[in-house]
Image (cartoon, rainbow, N blue to C red):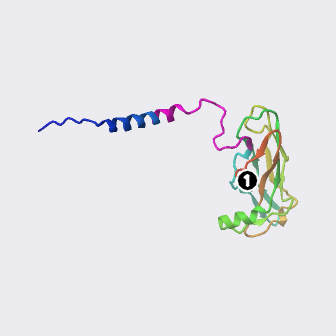
Amino acid sequence: ITKRRIDMKPISKILLFGALLIGAAAITSCSDDEKYDVDGYSYSRAYFANARNVTNGTVVNTPVGVITSLNTDLIVKSTGAAANDAHVTLGFDNSLVEKYNAANGTKYAAAPDGAVVLSGTTATIKAGKLQSTDTIKATINDQMAAQLNDPNGYLVPVVIASADNGLRPSSDAAVTYI
């Protein structure tokens, strides 16, 4: 067995030192600033806690009457703590039913106006908080329930229509489906 001594040539030493220097500069160049926005948005966005999910309800027509079951809570959240109380307005957008069906291979019908009722249309996110203090409940309108008889079912897209005080609706999480 013979021992060999490895003698690094001066150019190799310079390259190694340069690589270490660049690595150290990259590590130390990170900011300690705690105010940053990971995805590049300079504003806070309002979104649903259960965005893009589908909440199921049931309508059963019997000889005695119509039985409905839908009791879902809609909770609005913010990507950043609100500086002031922010108000988020909810609404329905039946234009999303066709897009949902195309994307998911379903054949839902758009529910008639008034078939699903919200307990309120405005949620408030208090200053310094990340979630609405009010929970908006969605229920099926008992007077319209008998008209809901499409065998493919219905889809009701609930959207964040607007927000104020520096809060904007999220571009990808401002819709939930019932």
Magenta residue check for 118? no
Q: Which residues are magenta?
A: 23-45
Instruction: Give percent across and percent down for residue 142.
Output: 85, 57
Which residue is at 65% across, 36% downward?
Answer: 36
**Residue type at the position of mark 1:** Thr
Which residue is at 71% across, 63% downward?
Answer: 100
Where disc 1 sits, the SS reads: strand
Image quadrant in which the C terminus is located: bottom right
Magenta residue check for 37? yes
Please state if 11 lies on the left or on the right of 108 as rendered: left
Please state if 81 lies on the left or on the right of 121 as rendered: left
Query: Above or below — where is 62 with respect to 91?
Result: below
- Provide the major secondary structure of the magenta segment: loop
Residue nearest the viewer, comparing 129 with 109: 129
> Among all residues in the image, which is located at the extreme front?
10
Q: What residue would you read off at disc 1?
A: 176
Whether residue 98 appears in this view of the structure is: yes
Query: Above or below — where is 27 with respect to 140?
Result: above
